[in-house]
Image: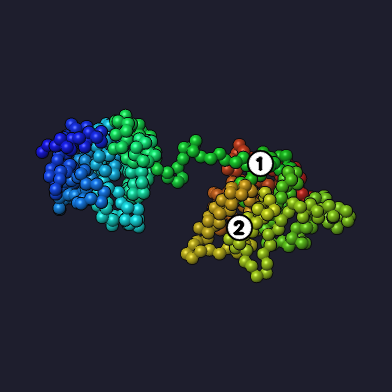
């Protein structure tokens, strides 16, 4: 079969190489009352389908521009290129039309196919189950030909319109967005009535094979959430780091906004008092605000007494009116208290909402949750305690990073054990009630352990960023009841 003079002129006007068209099996034939270009579809070298394109029918004229032989198989144009072992591992180009595929092949991209019947209309497909959409039988019937080892990269050269966008979406779902690219077409001739070329055939007409090569070379990967080059990542905000007043402890512990820390220790051994001393010193020295969610203390009595004593360096009952006034002004200016009402349960969700209010309205930088076991822990149905703890810590860490605050949780160990001499053993972060997630997920983990009536060990067991917030280590301190402060004695062995 040969190509008539009339069809030769049509192909030449589209920039199609006649010799290539003949090699691909294009021919011409009578169709209805006119002449059509015959486009063959082959499988293993045998023609199994023919499409016919009439160019003498304008939009709205009599007869269809496109037709085909009845009973032909539904397959991609140039499907056999997928069986060519010399092309295994090379990128595959999928076009929306046969002329676009010829334009790519003519420009040196042998591994090019075209969808058999154009792109779907945006609403003419099942996004819920693409395998059930007849439009894509040609893919699923020969899915092994598209295996990722044979086709590691797919360039979807769909048209620059709504139907083309639907085709791009569907094929990227079928093949996996991770290996799909898309094309952006160059500006078109002014007489086309559109800003950019619609497809590769128009690129071939306007710019020749070189333009097709350049267009394909500029193909861009489809965006896949969660995978970036360094240059694509937004710059991280600088998270402020604050040193404690305790000089020896600075080598082991620094408070960085955006981090999540946990403090544990035997009940009654000074966890709360140490956290109060540590955070108040940092807040006072740096002009920061603290939000306290202390469900075992009453702010009007317990917190006020402790904060008055800490600021003025002596018990509340030994302070004069002026000292109390200064302390109260500082408490009101630098501290916020998260307190549930009698008929409210302080669940994790309730707490996160109040924490957000404290940050947005009162600009707090440090949030202390003390103690963890006093929160109303509402697990989801069939959720284990370990799963709940992991979910809760993830939520708190996300909050800390999103709002650029430091969150400290005071958590009790599961149980306190004694040694052979009747002294309480120092617990570890793994002993915290609920889960090993406390050790695994915290940025900073601290143990407060009273050795005797005179000395308390402050042990940093976990530090995720040694160069930034300190290295694990121990400092021995004494506690001043009058000042409500810890005083360093020496570095513990």
Q: Position of residue 476 (x, y in %)?
A: 71, 44
Q: Is residue 430 left or right of residue 174?
A: right
Tell me the CA gap for discs 1 and 2: 23 Å
339 or 63: which is nearer to us?
63
Q: Position of residue 201 (x, y in %)?
A: 29, 37
Residue 241: mark: 1
Q: Residues within 10 Å of mark 2 (few under 14, many from 20)?
A: some
**Image quadrant where one finds the N terminus:** top left
Q: Residue at x 66, y 44 (%)?
A: 255
Would you place residue 405 above or below residue 215 in this image?
below
Q: Residues within 10 Å of mark 1 (few under 14, many from 20)?
A: some
The colour scheme used here is: rainbow
Q: Residue at x 67, y 69 (%)?
A: 342
314 or 397: which is nearer to us?
397
Circle 1: element type:
strand
Circle 2: element type:
helix
Quadrant in the rendering for residue 30: top left
322 or 66: which is nearer to us?
66
Q: Looking at the image, can residue 268 be seen?
A: no
What is the residue that sits farthest to the left in this orientation?
Answer: 1
Q: Residue at x 19, y 49 (%)?
A: 67
Upstream in sequence: badge 1 or badge 2: 1
What is the residue that sits farthest to the top in this orientation?
Answer: 210
Quadrant in the rendering for residue 297: bottom right
Residue 352: mark: 2
Q: Residue at x 14, y 37 (%)?
A: 4
**Image quadrant where one finds the C terminus:** top right
Count of numbered badges drawn on the protein? 2
């Amino acid at each position: 079969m040969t190509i008539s003079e009339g069809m030769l002129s049509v192909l030449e006007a589209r920039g199609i190489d006649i010799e290539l068209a003949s090699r691909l099996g294009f021919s011409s034939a009578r169709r209805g009352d006119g002449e059509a270009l015959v486009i063959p579809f082959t499988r293993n070298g045998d023609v199994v389908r023919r499409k016919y394109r009439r160019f003498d029918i304008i939009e709205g004229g009599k007869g269809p521009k496109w037709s085909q032989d009845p009973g032909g198989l539904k397959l991609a144009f140039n499907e056999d290129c997928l069986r060519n072992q010399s092309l295994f591992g090379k990128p595959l180009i999928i076009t929306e039309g046969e002329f676009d595929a010829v334009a790519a092949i003519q420009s040196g991209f042998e591994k090019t196919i075209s969808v058999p019947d154009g792109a779907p209309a945006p609403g003419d497909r099942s996004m819920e189950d693409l395998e059930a959409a007849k439009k894509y039988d040609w893919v699923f019937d020969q899915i092994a030909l598209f295996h990722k080892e044979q086709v590691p990269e797919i360039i979807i050269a769909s048209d620059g319109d709504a139907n083309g966008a639907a085709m791009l979406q569907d094929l990227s779902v079928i093949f996996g967005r991770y290996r799909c690219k898309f094309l952006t077409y160059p500006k078109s001739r002014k007489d086309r009535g559109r800003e950019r070329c619609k497809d590769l055939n128009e690129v071939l007409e306007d710019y020749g094979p070189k333009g097709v090569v350049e267009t394909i070379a500029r193909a861009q990967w489809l965006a896949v959430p969660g995978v970036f080059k360094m240059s694509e990542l937004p710059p991280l905000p600088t998270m402020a780091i604050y040193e404690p007043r305790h000089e020896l402890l600075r080598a082991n512990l620094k408070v960085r906004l955006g981090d999540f820390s946990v403090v544990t220790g035997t009940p009654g051994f000074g966890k709360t008092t140490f956290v109060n001393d540590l955070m108040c010193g940092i807040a006072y020295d740096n002009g920061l605000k603290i939000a306290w969610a202390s469900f075992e203390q009453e702010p009007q009595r317990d917190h006020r007494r402790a904060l008055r004593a800490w600021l003025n360096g002596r018990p509340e009952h030994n302070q004069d009116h002026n000292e109390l006034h200064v302390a109260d002004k500082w408490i009101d200016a630098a501290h916020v208290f998260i307190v549930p009402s009698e008929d409210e349960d302080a669940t994790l969700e309730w707490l996160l909402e109040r924490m957000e209010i404290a940050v947005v309205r009162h600009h707090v930088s440090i949030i202390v949750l003390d103690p963890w076991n006093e929160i109303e822990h509402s697990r989801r149905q069939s959720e284990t305690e370990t799963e709940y703890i992991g979910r809760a810590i993830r939520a708190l860490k996300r909050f800390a990073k999103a709002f650029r605050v430091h969150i400290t949780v005071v958590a009790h160990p599961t149980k306190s054990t004694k040694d052979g001499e009747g002294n309480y053993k120092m617990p570890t972060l793994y002993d915290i009630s609920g889960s090993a997630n406390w050790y695994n997920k915290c940025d900073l983990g601290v143990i407060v352990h009273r050795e005797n009536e005179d000395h308390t060990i402050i042990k940093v067991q976990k530090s995720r960023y040694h160069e930034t917030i300190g290295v694990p280590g121990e400092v021995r301190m004494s506690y001043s009841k009058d000042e409500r402060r810890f005083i360093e004695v020496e570095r513990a062995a």
